[in-house]
Image (spheres, helix red, strand yellow):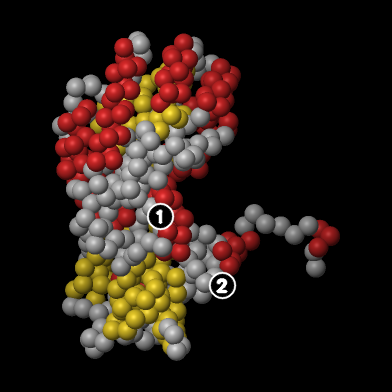
Amino acid sequence: MHYFLYKDGELFCEDVSVKTIAKKVGTPFYIYSYKTLTRHFSVFDDAFKKIPHLICYSCKANANVALLSVIRKLGGGADIVSGGELFKALHAGIQGNKIVFSGVGKTKEEIQFAIQSKILMLNIESEGEIEVIRDVAKDMKQKIPISIRVNPEIDPKTHPYITTGLKRNKFGILWTDALRLYKNIAKDPFLLPVGISSHIGSQILEIEPFVEAVKCLKKMFFKLKRTGISLRYIDIGGGLGITYKDELPPSPREYARAIARILKSTGLTLILEPGRILVGNSGIFITKLLYVKRTPEKNFYIVDGAMNDLVRPAFYNAYHEIVPVIESTNNQHIKVDVVGPICESGDFFAKDRKLPSLTPGHLIAILGAGAYGFSMSSNYNSRRRVAEVLVKDRDFYIIRKRESLKDLLRGESIPSFLEV
């Protein structure tokens, strides 16, 4: 459920007109609903209330510090994959002991930062990483809590670009290697094995892959316990899908019921890393129709938003529902490609989509854009990154200003021999 609704033919976010926000900030821009995000978090959290758990929001979905502050206010932590995400999570007030650090390419500097921040644990993804962490821990004279991200070799049946738990993927460590590494870690004076982790993919629409992965981790946990290695945490990642079109993902309650049943005898604290399911349908992208272009083969709606703002359709051929901000009264629909100004044929939001007949100047909303929208945006074609707005009840707040032209030059310089 979300709080983007039509009132008298006009799209609102909670109790604020989208058109009103557009007049204030210009287009294109992102809008997030505070009420939707808090509701999604509360429903997800409540589903697991019968077992010890910690929700570590996946920052990669959307790392705006205002949204991270909402997560902190609700009692959540953070799943991070970079030093930058760690910095932002801490800036938003999330405590270090509620942060887990995943990712295959942690640098020495990022590891040092994580240790200094006293995070809950580092999720290890390669044998080489263990060596670097050991060296850093030894230099800092600190015992470091770690977990191994085990690759359970389970097919989540999702887009191949967002599958992460198969042997061919770059993520995680195979169990045969992980068992040996756990034994070595347990003997190390500077490494403390506290958890076991996995993450099998994103936008997963069935419970079975999660169930198989958790059963696999449970079996590994008890095998480690028999060797004298006792863990405190089991991190099952995120990946539960949402509805973009006509998908029917499991509810958090169904998901929790299946997972809790498997883990109830372990005594472990469950760590969850939801991202998309919390913020995906909490945000929309607003763009303005610039031109209607008709050719013998195609009709085009050319808008001021582009693939640099929301890359998912171009990158994954992902579907996002598209609706007019002001409902059309003529009931006419045409088949169009919705495209942006970027100099790429892949710059599109929809192809051959049946949409209301609109004229230049109309505002268009692209739904389900809260996750992997702004966080994957860029300055390609020297386009300024857009504004972000948070709505709460009758008020709205600009939580990121639109970049200025001068921002495009930030960090760049002209060598003296090239100066005019």
| Quadrant the N terminus occupies | bottom left
Residue pointed to by mark 2: 343
Instruction: Judge the density around disc 2: few (<14), some (14-19), many (≥20) Cα neighbours within 10 Å.
Output: few
Left or right of 397 on screen, residue 123: right
Residue 10 higher or lower than 369, as above or below = below
Instruction: Locate residue 136, reporting x and y percent.
Output: 56, 23
Q: As shown in the figure, which amino acid type bears the numbered disc 1? A: Tyr
Instruction: Locate residue 322, reporting x and y percent.
Output: 32, 71
User: In which quadrant of the rendered view does residue 215 lie?
Assistant: top left
Residue 66 higher or lower than 208, as above or below = below
Q: What element carries label 2?
A: loop
Q: Nearer the viewer, mark 2 or mark 1?
A: 2
Left or right of 325 on screen, residue 160: right
**Residue depicted at 50% across the width and 43% down the height:** 84
CA separation, marks 2 and 1? 22 Å
| Quadrant the C terminus occupies | bottom right
- Taking depth in this image into account, of 41 and 249 the one nearest to the observer is 249
Mark seen at residue 372: 1
**Residue depicted at 35% across the width and 60% down the height:** 369
Instruction: Locate residue 133, reporting x and y percent.
Output: 53, 24
Left or right of 138 on screen, residue 94: left
- Taking depth in this image into account, of 416 and 196 the one nearest to the observer is 196
Q: As shown in the figure, which amino acid type bears the numbered disc 2? A: Cys
Instruction: Judge the density around disc 1: few (<14), some (14-19), many (≥20) Cα neighbours within 10 Å.
Output: many
User: In which quadrant of the rendered view does residue 80 lie?
Assistant: top left
User: In which quadrant of the rendered view does residue 174 lie?
Assistant: top left
